Amino acid sequence: MKKTLSILFIIAVVFSGCSKYGNVRLQYPTAPQAFLPKNIHTIASVNRSLTKKDDKHPIIEAITSGEIAGSDKKASDECLKGVYDKIKGWKQIDIFIPTKTRLYGTGTRETPELLDWKIVKHICDSAKADALLVLETFDSNSDLLASAVNNTVNAVLTGTIPPPALHQIRMNVVCYWRLYDPVNEKIIDQYKSTSFLTFDAGSSGIAIPPPQALPQTAYHAGEEYIRRFLSNYYYVNRSLYKSGKAADNQKFLSAFRRSEVADWDGALLAWEPLTKSNNRINAGRACLNMAVANEVLGKNDQALIWAKKAYVDYGNKLARDYQNQLQNRLSMEY
């Protein structure tokens, strides 16, 4: 079931050109992929992706796999920082990373067992948090982009000496997350994510990622995960009439100027008498403008009424297309 979005629009910007049309750009939110329960306002976040051995000594990882010695231990904390920075302050959600709390897991991509609920409750009580977000696993590697490999193979086959350098390396980070609800002893969310960023390997052609590659990709992985709980946005463009025919033209221009300064209520008052104009073209245009203005103000039912009137009563084809666009938008939100 789709959930009704509480925020109908964020931004309405009017663009004007030399034609008879003006354009309104609206920004609408989309529903997040996952929802936090209403009682969750504070989240503690901890790293469980390491072992005790990892915490004492650097990990010796194979250069052939593109991994850097000790890097996962350091970068996994960057993952939590990405979560922290992305959600901090979002709709009264507070997040903490307890400095004295370190949990240990498998140290591999193998998902560990659920944390004991006593541990979860202890951490949440200590941090005064409503939920506990745990980075259960963290693993990384890098690979050469196929285009770079193909270029090298082609250079060798054609006898080009020396072969071209490998310019780009893709760093991959695989994470597994769990969000614990200590009060109800439920898992709010569990999710495995694979994130990657592409980096310039330099001109040497050596297939080793630059030092900043892993921490940046890990930070990006944290941002990507927590974005599941945040609204995204999409844009729509609406056209309306700047001008009218004959004696009504100046009234249309005056009303449109009100919309340019975001005085949509004033524009509605100016366009409404024009919907009764003896000139059918002007009446249809005014009805269409009334529809767009009502959508900008979040009055979608009124917008549909005016759009139908513009097309059915006055044959305005722009209103027919607009009505379909508006109905499609509303179907995505409910």
Image (cartoon, helix red, strand yellow):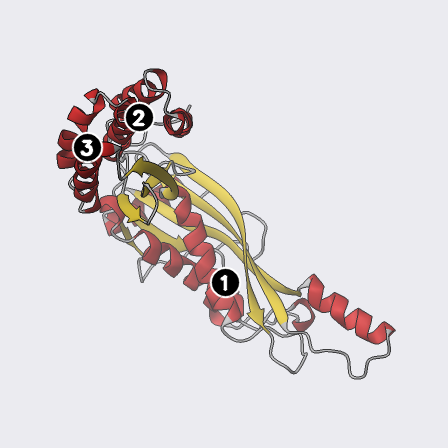
Q: State yes or no: discs 3 and 1 in contact (Cβ < 8 Å).
A: no
Q: Which mark identifies residue 281?
A: 2
Q: Quadrant of residue 318?
A: top left
Where residue 129 appears, x then y in whole percent?
A: 26, 46
Q: Amino acid at mark 2?
A: Ile
Does residue 297 sit above or below 14 in this rendering?
above
Q: Quadrant of residue 291?
A: top left
Q: Name the residue tied to disc 3.
A: 247
Where residue 141 appears, x then y in whole percent?
A: 61, 63
Q: Who's the residue at 42% across and 63% down the image? A: 78
Q: Is residue 170 visible?
A: yes
Secondary structure beneath label 3 = helix
Within 10 Å of the Cα at label 3, are there few (<14), some (14-19), or many (20+) other Cα atoms? Answer: few
Q: Which mark identifies residue 250?
A: none
Q: Is residue 29 visible?
A: no
Front residue (pair 127, 192): 192
Where residue 121 appears, x then y in whole percent?
A: 31, 43
Q: Name the residue tied to disc 1.
A: 217
